[in-house]
Structure formats: structure tokens, C-alpha cells
Amino acid sequence: MNVTVIVLLGIVGVVLLVVGIVVLAKVMVNRLSSSSQSAIEEQFVDSSIVKSDPMANFFGLGSKGGAQVRGNGALVLTDSELWFRRIGSATALRIPLQDISGVDVTRSHAGKTVGRSLLRVQFRMATVTDSVAWLVENPESWVHAINGDKTP
């Protein structure tokens, strides 16, 4: 075999490897999204959902700082609460809308950033004030929806 054939075989091998990785990643994301969508369907009736994102990327609670692990999960807004459950977790974060003190768009939260806009929600639980953020598609529409649900 000459050098040209070896180089071409190497290039073909690398291209096939990259294609395989991309296909595998797409399959995994689709499975995770499907699992998260199932969690939404189990928890809520379609008519109660104002907005949802089965693959919202959780940036953690502001009070816990940057040591938290990010993770994807189901984020749902109903007419009474904002609900989030990370994929693989049995515990949900439930924030009643009346406990939300502010909602906006930010570029970082709890010491983390991805160079895109995040949905940030400030809320009260008993006597504690905290914040949470998610990477969602069109965070401005979430701000509008949450504020719209809170406006009489």
C-alpha cells in the first residue's frame, strides 16, 4: 500500500467515527427528551400546561453556588406553578407562582455561563429567598408567560 491509500483510509475512518458519534449523540438526546416528555405527560393534563420544555438545562439554585451539577429535565409552567424535574431524579422542584418575586433573562447563574441567555426566576420559600436558572429556547417567551400568569 502506498502512502496515499493509507492517508485516504485514515480520513475515511475519521469521518466514519465522527458520523457515528453524531448519530449516537442524537439518539441519546432523543431518548432523554422522550423520557422527559413522558414525565410531563404523567404529571400534568395537557390543558393545565401553559408552556413546557422537556430538555431545559438546569443551572442550579443560586443559594448553592457553582458547585452544583447542571442537568437537563422537564420544565413546565402551569397557571399555578413552575415545575422542574431533572432526568433521572424522582424529586421535583415546585415553585408556586405566587412565590415568584422576579423573572428575567441573564447570561450567567450560580457561577456558570454558556454564552447564551438563561431564564432566571427569583422566588421565596417560607422565609428564604433564592433563584434558579435554566437554558431554554426563547427565554424571553418564558418571562412573558410567567409574568402574564402572575398579572391579574
Image (cartoon, helix red, strand yellow):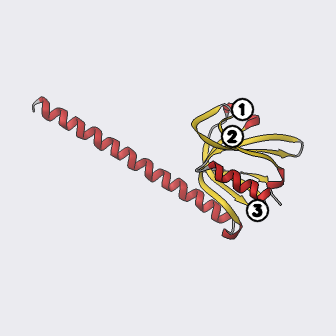
Residue sitting at x 77%, y 35% = 63
Can residue 49 be spotted in the picture?
yes
Q: Give percent across and percent down for residue 38.
A: 60, 62
Residue 79's disc is: 3
Badge 1 local density, few (<14 within 10 Å), some, or many (20+)?
A: few
Q: Nearer the viewer, residue 2 or 83?
A: 83
Residue sitting at x 19%, y 38% = 9
Of circles 2 and 3, the one toward us is 3
Residue at image mark 2: 60
- Dot 2 and dot 1 residues touching (CB under 8 Å): yes
Mark 2 or mark 1, earlier in chain: 2
Quick check: 102 left or right of 110? right
**Viewport quadrant of the N terminus:** top left
Amino acid type of the residue that numbered disc 2 sits on in the rendered structure: Gly
> How far is disc 2 from disc 3 in space, using C-alphas?
23 Å
| Element marked by disc 2 | strand
Q: Residue furthest right?
A: 127
Of circles 3 and 1, the one toward us is 3
Amino acid type of the residue that numbered disc 3 sits on in the rendered structure: Asp
Residue at image mark 1: 65
